[in-house]
Image (cartoon, rainbow, N blue to C red):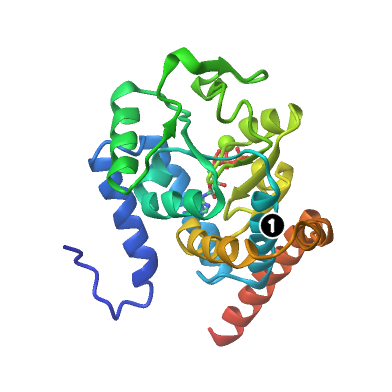
Amino acid sequence: MSLIPKSHPRAKSLLIREKLVSGFDRGLVAKEGLLAHGRGEAFDYLLGEKTRKTAKLAIRASAAQILLADLPVISVNGNIAALCPKEVVRLANASRAKIEVNLFYANAKRRRNIINTLKKNGAKEILGINSSSSTILPGLDSARRIVDKNGIFAADVVIVPLEDGDRTIALRKIGKKVITFDLNPLSRTSQTANITIIDNVTRAMGLLIVECRNLSKKNKRILEKIVNDFDNKKNISDNIIEIRDNLTRRSCIA
Ligand code: ATP
Ligand code: MG
């Protein structure tokens, strides 16, 4: 039971924090994941804790890109398993994407907890479990270099929410199209992904699922046009303007 009153002006953000702390207590989230979340909270504060126009544009382009993919894969880490496991499964169902567990701070027990959480939320097939189908992603030192031959390794589009820059760069170097959710428009991940959704993953994931369902009725030509018309660099610059405008408004009110 949450102790946060619904009337609290930042109730939503505090509830998200509670989810993450509970994920830590349940052995899903690494200590470092708590710090990454704090960094995300700071940027969400600057954004005004709401989904901005640039995020909506990036979500639409992401949905089109995922629907065009031959093999889209959603990479799941501890923070994602704690914050939105149900949405990961729904996104996979709405887009024929596979789900793969990939951890920076790998640890067998945490991996098992994450897999169980995904299963409880309806995941049928989860990759990144079976060492007999694993292989090495070049250009990385950490445990994240171990990927599934039938998943991230074979994917043409990889969805990496809350990701570290090294891994995004390594995925781009071997020709993968990378879609990320990242609240920090200046992170290396944001700057190197093909499509950066600058929004809280807890708000944006649901919108991406709806967009995948809507666009699944469109033909390939329309989907390609949506992807080709999207300019990630411009969208990131526009997001920084959104942040600036929000801060200007806030400081005028104060
Ligand atoms: P990079 O390695 O890409 O330069 P970093 O080292 O600052 O980034 P990491 O810990 O590697 O950060 O990645 C986590 C990223 O996820 C951070 O940019 C953080 O702002 C972002 N983040 C944290 N929580 C959320 C959330 N709930 N929704 C969206 N993004 C988030
Ligand atoms: Mg990093």
Which residue is situated farthest in the left direction here? Answer: 1
Q: Is residue 17 above or below residue 79?
A: below
The location of residue 120, given as percent across then percent down, is: 27, 45
Q: Quadrant of residue 218?
A: bottom right
Which image quarter has ligand 2? top right
In this image, 71 relative to 27: left or right?
right
Q: Residue at x 53, y 83 (%)?
A: 254
The location of residue 101, given as percent across then percent down, is: 45, 33
Which residue is situated farthest in the top direction here? Answer: 132
In this image, 210 relative to 186: left or right?
left
Q: At label 1, which amino acid type do we have?
A: Ala
Q: Is residue 217 above or below residue 165?
A: below
User: Circle 1 is placed at which residue position?
Assistant: 64
Q: Is residue 35 above or below residue 49?
A: above
Q: Quadrant of the N terminus?
A: bottom left
Disc 1 residue crowd, few under 14, some 14–19, many 20+, Cα 10 Å: many
Q: Residue at x 35, y 23 (%)?
A: 107
In this image, 150 relative to 244: left or right?
left
The location of residue 157, given as percent across then percent down, is: 66, 40
Q: How many marks?
A: 1
In this image, 185 relative to 39: left or right?
right
* Nearer to us in this view, 254 or 202: 202
The location of residue 216, given as percent across then percent down, is: 62, 61
* Nearer to us in this view, 189 or 203: 203
Q: Is residue 194 above or below residue 94?
A: above
Question: Considering the numbered disc 1 on the image, is that residue within a helix, a strand or a loop?
Answer: helix
Q: Residue at x 70, y 44 (%)?
A: 193
Determine if the C-beta at disc 1 is less than 8 A from ligand 1.
no
Q: Quadrant of residue 132?
A: top left
Q: Residue at x 74, y 26 (%)?
A: 174
* Nearer to us in this view, 19 or 210: 210
